[in-house]
Image (tube, helix red, strand yellow):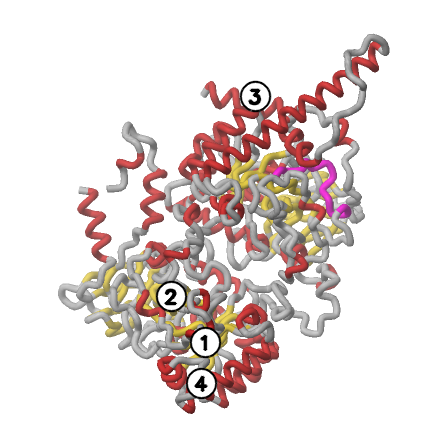
Amino acid sequence: MKRLFLSVLLAAALPAAAQDLLIRDATVHTAGAAGTLRDHDVLVQGGVVRAIGPGLAAPAGVTVVDAKGKPLTPGLFGGLTGLGIEEVSGEPSTVDGGLALGAMVPAHEGSSWRPEFDVDVAFNPHSSAIGVNRVEGVTFTVLAPSALPGGSFVAGQGSAVLLDGRYDAALAGSRSLFIDLGSDASGLSGGSRAGQWMLLEQAVAEARSGGGDGLLTRAGRAALARYLAGGRVVFHVDRAADIRQVLAFAKKNGMRPVIAGGNEAWRVAAELKAADAVVLLDSLANLPANFDSLAASLENAARLHRAGVRVGFSQRGDATHNARKVRQLAGNAVANGLPWEAGLAGLTSVPADAFGLGQRGRIAVGQAADLVLWSGDPLEVNTVAEQVWFGGVPASMRSRQTELRDRYLAPKGNLPRAYTGH
Amino acid sequence: MHHRFQASLLATALLALPALAPAAEAPFASTYAPIGAGPVLITDATVLTGDGRRLETTDVLMKDGKIAAVGTDLDPAGATVVDGRGKWVTPGIIDVHSHLGVYPSPGANAHSDGNEMTSPVTSQVWAEHGVWPQDPGFAAALAGGVTSLMILPGSANLIGGRGVVLKNVPAETMQAMKFPGAPHGVKMACGENPKRVYGGRGQAPMTRMGNIAGYRAAFIEAQRYREAWDKHEAASRDEGKRRKGAPAGNGQPPARDLRMETLAEVLRGEITVQIHCYRADEMALMMDLAREFNFKIHAFHHGVEAYKLADELAAEGICGALWADWWGFKMEAYDGIQENIALVDRPSNGCAVVHSDSSEGIQRLNQEAAKVMVRGERAGLKLPPEHAIRWLTANAARAIGIADQVGTLEEGKMADVVLWNGNPFSVYAKAEKVYVDGALLHDLNDPARRPVSDFMLGQEVSP
């Protein structure tokens, strides 16, 4: 009986036909212009939100869920992660997020610069790390390739992916190029951050001319060229002076910049606002971790927001396995001066907009019904996700971790614990 | 039951052992002196005492650096009165696993002083000799209510060296931070790290088999060393008593060996044993190692699988110093669950500790505990604030051997106290005032009462 129950739940994690759903009496945090709507209902039909309002009529056959006033939010952005391309960080055979051909190919035989590298094709929707974070309300992430020794600081491309367990999870129009800059990347640019700009200028010149000096392959030139006409480029960069260089470079080359990290971003808030750049920051990064981050501050998010810069959240540390920690980033940003609604937006609408996901990131009529019902304030550390929906379909709220928990929560029986959990 | 009783007897016996002569002459002695402050009376606060009690509308009096009284309507005479209405008071937070100072900010190569990766057994090195007191991370931790912390060597080695307990006070020297009377803690490491570091060099240990063989070889050597010294000291005592007819021997002490001295102190129960160990099966092996050589393990650190062995840990009086939610970054961390701390806490005599191992995590151990509390409660456990605060205070103090001086708000203990602007188990809570030995060293509302390290002073881009 229990086995049947569990397999039904697990099956619910798989893509299924959207079902109709009416969530009654929620505190609806729309993450949009409507702000927070108390005692509102949300009607989902055909996978999208059809109506929001108090006392909606329930169409025949619709599943009704009583939210009892609890908070309902859009599904959360897990940050820039390796979810689905990294199983166990310390085991290289399970990690597909970075390319280091330089470690295999002698320099004269080929370049380690491969901007055409795209991690989407390595995505495994069944990674245990996805389920673990899904049950915490994380419904989408952006796959961020990493710059590795033996590779390039132009780490490659990745897309936003939906974390409902489907194979073809990449969301249309979200593909982005990732470039690491500053002291963390200087080992890949001849020991100098000036070398980063020298090499980038060379790569751009090759992409524009279609030929060149051999930094890029033909495919690499074509890939980079696509970003020179309004493409989205995520720059991992912290130092204020470097961020200004990024904005100038992006403007000159027709790129739409997203700043990832941005520990000193608040110091150049006006420039970021003028460039309409989004900053995806780690609001817990308040220490001078290196000489690129001397101005790191818990108030980074609040100061940027006050200056009109759109702020989202992404972790610097264990971004993948603990992607669920993004809520804590937002909560701490709010505790340090960011308005609550902006904190929620940083987990939902801001990243969705930044990556071109027009149908996600808000609770609004016509939006995909990726929703999360919370036990309390979703930005708090003392709350949990009670139910997650993708397109109105309830996700299983079980993961490998809940299975382990329940196995060891139960008292020891006559048989070893290995016989439990079926 | 019998087993548990024996274990607690053993623990009591070890704790009662007097310090030996060499310890009394310990070099690099603490020069810590409490920063003087007049009496302070916090009134009408919600007080979590650290020993399991929650007292509403209660006063806390600090005097001469000590907790003088916890009660109602305490006499404010001569004291600075702090209105605690709507606020919460807890003992100072204690982090049993920090690398502040030895892996400081900025993380320059020149600052990398936490792992003596030159040999699998480096019990001769002391973390305190690598601590840079100007690490800005200390002030950040203070802002999170951390008043004491153990700085440990890293986990590259089977036996990495001695850790030191510090008071979290700004100072120019490590000695001026050193917690007076606190025992050292030896850092050992199980599992992947030592075998990766040394195996990668084609050297032992290359496997978990090599790990265990390495600890055993070291402790066999330490037993001989200890015996030689015990014999020498006994002979010296006999000689002193009888003056004549002393046993054979030239009276010369054995050669000192710093590497062995640390392990001999472990065998004598003079320093605590802090073991980095993730997997339950490896913890069980380390418990057998401790039985073979008759030493006590105080805490397993990281222990993402400690929940699988919670009853055994409690029976042996071993603490689990754990993260709230880290997992998956290596194979031995693959089975992490967010209820780990709550499950280690569950048995009677369970000793759960929230630790950081992180310059970020140490700033918000209260939030880490809150994440565990909600998940534990939803799993059916009862974890009110007055109980969970012990994970950050009393249990932590117990794990590193300073429970007689800090960890609860008992009268006579050091007045390490945090006044929170609300329930501390919330993302929005902040440590409003942090007292160390009764002195106000961090004030949320007074920039002049917030330390700035020499490193940050005068930086043009200061936050």
Percent x, y of residue A115: 41, 77
Q: Residue at x 67, y 36 (%)?
A: B259
Percent x, y of residue B357: 56, 50
Q: Residue at x 56, y 32 (%)?
A: B297
Amino acid type, label 3: Leu
Could you give the CA–CA distance between mark 1 and mark 2, rounded to whole angstroms? 19 Å
Main secondary-structure element of the magenta-colored stretch: loop
Tag 3 residue = B9
Q: Which residues are magenta?
A: B175-186
Residues B130 and A278: in front is B130
Q: Is residue A19 left or right of residue A84?
A: left
Could you give the CA–CA distance between mark 4 and mark 2, rounded to whole angstroms? 26 Å
Which residue is situated farthest in the top direction here? B245
The crowd level at tag 4 (other Cα within 10 Å; few <14, some 14-19, many 20+) is: many
Q: Is residue B352 left or right of residue A63?
A: right
Q: Are marks 3 and 2 in contact (CB under 8 Å)?
A: no
Q: Are marks 1 and 4 in contact (CB under 8 Å)?
A: no
Give the secondary structure at mark 3.
Answer: helix
Which residue is situated farthest in the left direction here? A60
Tag 2 residue = A76
Percent x, y of residue A374: 37, 59
Labels 4 and 2 share a subunit: yes
Q: Is residue A49 left or right of residue B391?
A: left
Amino acid type, label 1: Val
Q: Nearer the viewer, mark 1 or mark 2?
A: 1
The crowd level at tag 2 (other Cα within 10 Å; few <14, some 14-19, many 20+) is: many
Labels 1 and 3 share a subunit: no
Disc on the earlier residue, 1 or 4? 1
Chain containing the residue with disc 2 = A
Could you give the CA–CA distance between mark 3 and mark 4, rounded to whole angstroms? 70 Å
Amino acid type, label 4: Met
Tag 4 residue = A255
